Amino acid sequence: MKKQLLAIAITALAAGGAFAQANDTLAKIKASGVITEGVRESSGLSYTLGNGQYTGFHYDICANIIKDLEKAVGKKLETKYQPVTSQNRVPLVQNGTVDLECGSTTNNATRAKDVSFAVTTYVEEVRIAVKANSGITGIKDLNGKTVATTTGTTSVQTLRKNERAGGIDFKELYGKDHSDSFLLLESGRADAFVMDGSILASNIAKSKAPAEYKLVGEVLSVEPIAIMIRKDDAAFKKAVDDSIKGQIKSGELNKLWDKWFLKPIPPANVTIGLPLSDATKNAWANPNDKPMEDYAAKK
C-alpha cells in the first residue's frame, strides 16, 4: 500500500512539474535551447522572403526580444520559425507550439481569454482599400458591393458595426491570407478590401500598379497590435515587456518604423509611406497591454 501511495505521489509530482514547465516559457526555452517564433507568410508586420526566411517590422522587434531572452536564460537560443495564419495563431500559442507570435494580431478581450499579449507595439487603423477609379469614397458607397477581407480576422464585423454602415448591404468575400484578399480586389472579384491600414498600404505598395489603388473613407476602428504569448506566464510576459520597453526607450522602435514604413524596402525598394500615428506614439510613450475595447475609433 505504501509503495502504491509513493508511486501515486511521484506521478503527481511529475505531472505538476510538466504543467509548471508548460506555463514557464523561460524554463522551457532554457532547457531546450530553442524558441519558436510564429511568423506570417503575408502580413504588413512580418512576412516571408522564401526559403524559410522571414522579415518585417515585428520580425525585427522579436529578433531583439530573443537577444534579450538569451541574456535572461544565460545561453544562445536557436530560433525556429512556425508559419501561422489568422485561423491557427491562437491555438498554436495555446498548445505550446509557438512561444512568441510576431505577426499582426489585435489584442482584444475575446483573444485575451485564451492568450496574453505583450505591451502594444503598434496601434492599427482599420481602413478600406479600393481601386482609384471605383468611385467609392467611403462606407456609404459599399451598398450592393462585394467587400473582401481575410479569413480569421474581424475587419468586416468592424465595418458592419460602424455607425455609418446602417442600411448598407454588401456581400462578403474571404481570402485565405492577405495576399489572396488583395488579389480579390486586384482581379475585380471584390470592390473593396477592408483590413488593417498597414497591411493595405503594404499590399498596394508591392502591387504591379500602386497608383491604381487608394485608401478611402473614415477610420473604421483603432486596434492595438501586440506580440502574443501564452496565458498565465507572468515571468515570460515581464521579460518580453521589458525588452519592448527597452527598445522604445533606446529609440530602436522609431528606427525600425522608419526602416519598414518610410524608407525603400529591399529587394524591390518599395516605400510604403506610412507615417507614425499619434495613437502609436502615445502607446510607446505610455506602454500598456490594453485591449482594443479600451480604444475608441476616431469619429
Image: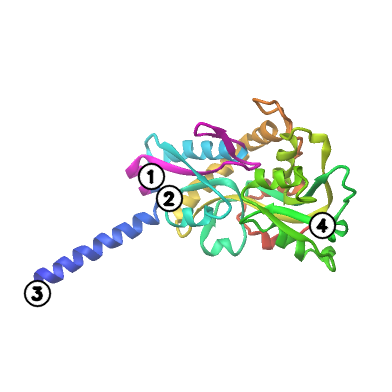
Going from the N terminus, do you reach mark 3 or mark 2 first?
3
Q: Nearer the viewer, mark 2 or mark 4?
A: 4
**Is residue 173 visible in the rendered structure shown here?**
yes
Pick the residue in front: 203 or 182: 182
Give the residue number, with chain letter if any, for mark 2: 97
| Residue 222 x, y percent position in the rendering | 73, 55
259 sits left or right of 36 in the view: right
Question: Residue at image x 79%, y 63%?
Answer: 162
Type of amino acid at the residue the image marks with label 3? Met
Going from the N terminus, do you reach mark 4 or mark 3 first?
3
Q: CA distance from mark 4 to mark 3?
A: 74 Å
Give the residue number, with chain letter if any, for mark 4: 145
Q: Which residues are magenta?
A: 27-56
Q: Tell me the SS state at disc 4.
A: loop
Q: Nearer the viewer, mark 2 or mark 1?
A: 2
Q: CA distance from mark 3 to mark 1?
A: 39 Å
Q: Mark number for residue 1? A: 3
Give the residue number, with chain letter if any, for mark 1: 29
Magenta segment: does it hold 44? yes
Q: How many marks?
A: 4
Q: CA distance from mark 1 to mark 4?
A: 49 Å
Instruction: Find out whether the residues at labels 4 and 3 contact each other: C-beta distance under 8 Å.
Output: no
Question: Residue at image x 69%, y 49%?
Answer: 123
148 sits left or right of 82 in the view: right
Q: CA distance from mark 2 to mark 1?
A: 12 Å
Question: Residue at image x 14%, y 67%?
Answer: 6
